[in-house]
Amino acid sequence: MERTEHVTCTFCGCLCDDIAVEHEDGRISSVSRACPNGRAHFLDYASAPHLPRIQGEEVSWEEALAEAARILNAARSPLLYGLSSASTEAIRKAVALADRLGAFVDSTSSVCHGPTGLAMQAVGEPTCTLGEVRSRADLLLFWGCNPAASHPRHFARYSTAAKGRFVPEGRKGRTVIFVDVRLTPGARSADLFLRVDPGCDFEVLTTLRALVREKPLRGTEEACVGGVPLGVLRDVATRLKSCRYGVAFMGMGLTMTRGRDVNVAELFRLVAELNTYTRFSVIPMRGHGNVTGADQVLTWQSGFPFAVSYARGYPRYGPGEFTAVDLLRRGDADAALILASDPAAHFPSRAAARLASIPTVVLDPEESLTARGATVWLPTGKAGIDVSGSAYRMDGVPLRLRPFLAPRRPSDEEVLGWLLEEVAP
Ligand code: SF4
């Protein structure tokens, strides 16, 4: 039995890098310090080599790669989708492949934090690292997110309960405010919970901005904005202005509800204005382990974070037009390469039905629903377990992913490199 320390979990954007794993003969037997999601990420991973499949039948790697290249070469309008659970190096190869094919390329950002990218482009993002949050933040504002379920170690490692250099008391030294449409498990431990009426985040954010800037507002202290009494919002505005170092975390309760990017832009404006009075930052709660890396690579390769078309030989940006769900719904993609994601399980039914009707090449360590229905399934290794790579944490800090099992499958990066050689420019 061998024990490896300082393993990085890539299940969610926290990228906890303090995990200890015990393993023997290529099998993981125990995992320490991970949350239940992280434990499943390691323990459910079957590192035994699988053969690739064509239409569900096992074939050799040579046959599978030849068929994958044939599908991509024959397509007039291919789509490359997913990216967010692959290594940064693999994502880079995927974008190069999209460029070579004249394809559309989109990541899972388009169905979670795409609006955050739009807001960032519109008003900028005053941000910081999770290390600064841990060391300095004495006020934490969680808006439209539920870290207790989605990022279970966030509180202990980085935010509410973490003991930091300038917050040695941990939870006692921090004020925690939650804003959501319902009382989530994490919100139960908050100092203040604001229940917002569904779809009214923008109104509440705008009012908070006005109160921070001390604009005169009509109405009594009991009058509600988006379900929150004005007196409560005035109290929140005062707390936000008078903290020493505040950080806002926002999730899909803000990005995927009425207003979307307009909501996020309003939060970014509020955070920027708070810097007139104190120090304040914002960090989006990114879900998939390397979804931040997908945005980074696409931006440095094409200039845009998601929804990119190379169909004219140069990158064009089209949220709502070149986003995977919209392309599939319209029937505009005639083949797809899916990298480390499961759109068949998560896309709206019309987009999923279209995906099932076109030839698909799937690179995924897991035999997901999308992999099971794929024309070609290429079972690759997993970065941070049996292949190497790197990934970006939710705050944009890149981390090296060191494998602790001997590789028994090719990496996504290798497979995409082979395909890149095989497809016609
Ligand atoms: S919080 Fe996220 S990164 Fe950390 S162990 Fe849990 S799933 Fe893994």
Image: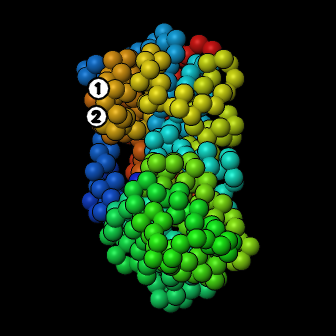
Nearer-the-camera pick, 63 or 279: 279
Residue pointed to by mark 2: 369
Instruction: Determine whether the residue tagged by mark 1 lies in a helix, strand or loop.
Output: loop
Amino acid beneath label 2: Leu
Q: Is residue 164 above or below residue 392?
A: below
Residue pointed to by mark 1: 373
Residue 384: x, y in percent?
A: 46, 52
Left or right of 142 in this view: 41: left
Picture quarter with the N terminus: bottom left
Which residue corresponds to the image point at 55% horizontal and 54% vertical from the top-left?
263
Amino acid beneath label 1: Gly
Which residue lies most toward the front here? 219
- Cα–Cα gap, marks 1 and 2: 6 Å
Whether residue 250 appears in this view of the structure is no
- Marks 1 & 2, CB-CB < 8 Å contact: yes
Which residue corresponds to the image point at 61% horizontal and 40% vertical from the top-left?
305
Q: For the residue carrying disc 2, how many other residues have a C-alpha within 10 Å: few (<14), some (14-19), or many (20+)?
A: some
Which residue corresponds to the image point at 25% horizontal and 22% vertical from the top-left?
56
Residue 372: x, y in percent?
A: 27, 29
Residue 163: x, y in percent?
A: 51, 83
Instruction: Determine whether the residue tagged by mark 2 lies in a helix, strand or loop.
Output: helix
Residue 170: x, y in percent?
A: 49, 85
Q: Is residue 412 above or below residue 122?
A: above
Nearer-the-camera pick, 87 or 208: 208
